[in-house]
Amino acid sequence: MIKSKLIKLLCAFSSKEVIGFRSFINSPYFNKNKKIRQLGDYILDLHPDFQQKNIDKKTVYELIYKNEKFSETRINNLTSDLFQLALNFLAQEKYARQKNEISINLMSELLRKEQYPELVRASKKFSRSLDQTPVKDANYHLNQYFLNSLQDTHFLQQSSRKADPNLQLKSNNLDLFYFASKLKIACDMTSRNIVVDAGYNCKHLHYLLEQIDDNKSIFEKVPAVYIYTKILKTLIEEDLESHFHELKQLLSENLLTFEQEELADMYDYVLNYCIKKINSGKSGFYEEVFELYKLLLENEIIFNNGILSQWDFKNILSTGLRFNNFEWVGNFLEQYKTRLPEQVRENAYSYGRAYLHFMKKEYKNALQLIHQVEFTDPSYHIGVKMIQLKSYYELNEIEPFFALVEAFKIYIFRNKQLSPYRKQANKNLLQIASKIFKLKNQKSILTQSEYNRKRKTLIALLESTEPLSGADWLNQIIEDL
């Protein structure tokens, strides 16, 4: 078989990239070797399946070298050259997308060749494009720095003795690029230190924050710097909720200031802040999460290349149902179903509809839909089992309920993907849910005093048990008894 690293790389190519790569290897500028073109054309015709029998080394060798004696070294070298061309193609494609970098390189070459009239025209054109773009991220300031630097060098070559502003401007823009980039890294380091105690140390951070605080009137006009300052403060001064509210306002005012990917990362910090507050007992932040998800959907921030991950889909669904927004959730399921990855689309959609029916107390419909969900992941498996368990409880289906509890226990015990914490939290849930269900069905045969005593014992058990999944549901059903 042809070298697997080449096939593995080509498998990752989209149909559009395959067409582009074919043109690339057939261009004399990039490739003058006719045999590499033959090999490339043959292999690309097999995209995306690449059947092994069709790319056997001897078969391909005979196609290219006809009746010449087979040489494994020869075919290996040819495929290595094609692999290198594929890498060069990816780099070229990346470069072609970097319009600003192309402009900067062009101006640099015009300056080197002393083509000053063309340089001036190119500089003005590039300057206008920077002024007109709404994106003012760290790279915007870096591009301004390169422009100012080229203009400053051009000015010096004119042997003029008058002052020129570009020297100061390139210094200022380099500072802003550094501040924005450094603060972005500081946010990432601080976040990871919180999660895994990584021990990262962002040097000179104290100086940066001091400079920003001392020059607030300047930096608050630079979103690329000021927003990361606020993110950092939500991480290191999380008890001051004013930082969170200011950050949320800043982001809503700068939805066009950053590329979608960076904006999504910024909002991840905001969502994580809310989740930490919820975990500390501040349930009011659930509403903040719901409003954030609506904003992320409406402004297409939460999508990656137009795709909504199944986990974001599941989280949005759960958050909406928490507030019994049934109409909104129903519309969400239908509107965004097609934005899910194709391979998990029907599964996530069926789960969502089942969960919606359950929350609407349409338990039989929920149980019917749940059978359409495949267990592709422990989170889905547990989610499905929880809907079944709660539905059996509400329908008072005694045998199915306890049969499911036993099957659930076995699944938890055997599953190696679940952490010890999640295993114990779900075991505790099953234990307490079983006790509550038994008490529910004993009500008619117990005296009122016995019933009240058992119920108080269960409430005490519920309050003292940690870790515990589904605590909200357990509290609700024990309150309903």
Image: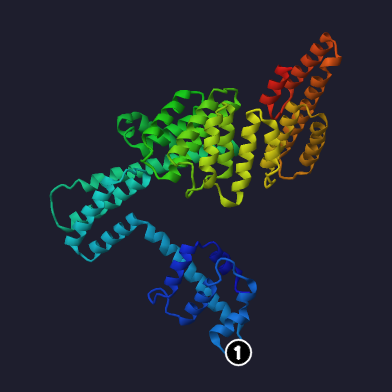
Classify residue 65 by image quadrant: bottom right
Q: Which of 394 and 418 is in front in this view?
A: 394
Which residue is rendered at x = 68% and y = 35% of the image? Answer: 365
- Residue on which disc 1 sits: 69
Image quadrant where one finds the C terminus: top right
Residue 214 seen: yes
Left or right position of 194 against 478: left
Left or right position of 75 against 374: left
Q: In this view, does 157 lie above or below 406?
A: below
Q: Residue furthest top?
A: 449
Residue 207 seen: no
- In percent of width and height, residue 122 lies at 23, 57
- In percent of width and height, residue 398 lies at 81, 29
- In percent of width and height, residue 306 lies at 48, 48
Query: Secondary structure beneath disc 1?
Result: loop
Left or right position of 463 against 224: right
- In percent of width and height, residue 107 lies at 26, 59
Residue kind at label 1, given as amino acid type: Lys
